[in-house]
Image (cartoon, grey):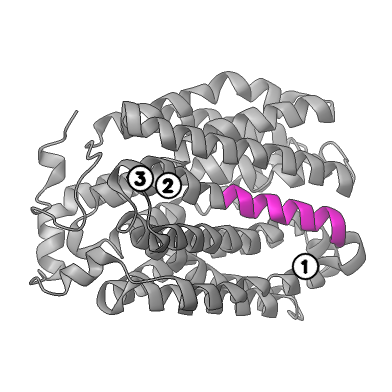
Amino acid sequence: MAWTREQRNVTVASYLGWTLDAFDFFLMVFMLKAIAAEFTTDIPAVAFAITLTLAMRPIGALIFGRLADRFGRRPIMMIDVGIYSALEFLSGFAPNLTVLLILRALFGIAMGGEWGVGAALTMETVPIQSRGFVSGILQAGYPTGYLLASVVYGLLFDKIGWRGMFMIGVLPALLVLYIRRHVRESPSWTAAQTRPRPSWKAILQRDWKLALYAIVLMTGFNFFSHGTQDLYPTFLQVQHHFDTHTVSLIAITYNIGAIIGGLCFGTLSEHIGRRNAITIAALIALPIIPLWAFSSSPYLLATGAFCMQVAVQGAWGVVPVHLNELSPDEVRGTFPGLVYQLGNLLASVNASMQAGFAKSHGGDYALALAAVAGTVAVIIAVLIRFSPERRGVDMVNPTGSGDVMAHAGG
């Protein structure tokens, strides 16, 4: 089936929205050491900013998701992108750690809104048989943002410092102009305006088991991604004493792997099912851990990190389509983003936990990274087997969501 111009534009806009959101988020992970030095504190204290950002994301998912279900995906996405860009810029002016923590918490609210709204807009618009591939594209936006942050860090950090890095983060605001000019509203949301909507209470009573399961699953997924990404640059800086250039090159390498993984497993899920693709990707991570965490040379660490992110973001590449297909039709602007971000909330302790664990073990970040990665890879592989399989469900003309946990497909 040929794509229309509108379908291409929506995919581009949503991909860029998540890419630039992730870019703004990941700039922070490269600067923990520098910020700690300027504010005369330690890395775990600054890493708390990452915890706050992740913890506040469910609030944004709920606020912006509810607004998107009521007023449309397109206008709310524009507002959200503008807000997170402005907060990133303001972070560069923080006079002390307390103000920076407040700004990063507010940034977390805006960041939490983008993924759910953008994913719903895209999955409701693209051809059904292309959802798996597009899911991989959308989720590839996350490592693409990390990749951009890696490049900017390597090229500019030594020249402009951490404050200048945050100020560069205002650039995503330009995406608002593209959305306004080229993106149309979701056909599913438009069609839904003619149908009666059940109350939130009725939806929760009907689908509470699905919601609870999805939150637990996304908690595992968020430990998987953040547990292998957020402190990896710090691990390279502190434990291996690599310079800015080396850290940047390794980060670029593993984010290329992440993009490849998301695209490959997202596409594969269209053929073997969402659950099977996620299971395979999660289990692939296990034999990679020794190379990824316990190597000594930059070349071996880069190779291990590349392979690890193929696995991690391979599993994640299926998440946008799987959560949107599982979602009750009436709240698709809210449900996928909210359960995703509630999982983020429960996993938001990861950065502080890993940094504290490493500090208490003589600075051994490798052990902290390996323990989290190995544990959650197994948990995800087990949990996903309990998931319903709703590959190819009609989002524009639904026949009724019902309690999907009660009739999971194969």
Is 378 positioned to the left or the right of 189 in the image?
A: right
Q: Which residue is mark 2?
A: 134
Please tell me which residue lies in front, 212 or 92: 92
Which quadrant is the N terminus positioned in?
A: top left
Q: Which residue is mark 1?
A: 165
Q: Amino acid at mark 3?
A: Arg
Is mark 2 in CB contact (under 8 Å) with mark 1?
Answer: no
Q: Most prominent secondary structure in the magenta stretch?
A: helix
Residue ID at (84%, 36%): 240
Residue ID at (36%, 74%): 63
Which quadrant is the C terminus positioned in?
A: top left
Is 153 positioned to the left or the right of 200 in the image?
A: right
- In three-dimensional space, the C-alpha distance between marks 2 and 3, rounded to whole angstroms, equals 5 Å
Q: Secondary structure at mark 2?
A: helix
* Residue 219 seen: no
Q: Nearer the viewer, mark 1 or mark 3?
A: 3
Q: Which residue is mark 3?
A: 131
Circle 3 crowding by C-alpha within 10 Å: few under 14, some 14–19, many from 20: many
Q: At which x and y percent is residue 269?
A: 37, 33
Residue numbers of the magenta segment: 142-156
Is mark 2 in CB contact (under 8 Å) with mark 3?
Answer: yes
Is mark 1 in CB contact (under 8 Å) with mark 3?
Answer: no
Quadrant of residue 33 within the rendered picture: bottom right
Q: Amino acid at mark 2?
A: Val
- In three-dimensional space, the C-alpha distance between marks 2 and 1, rounded to whole angstroms, equals 30 Å
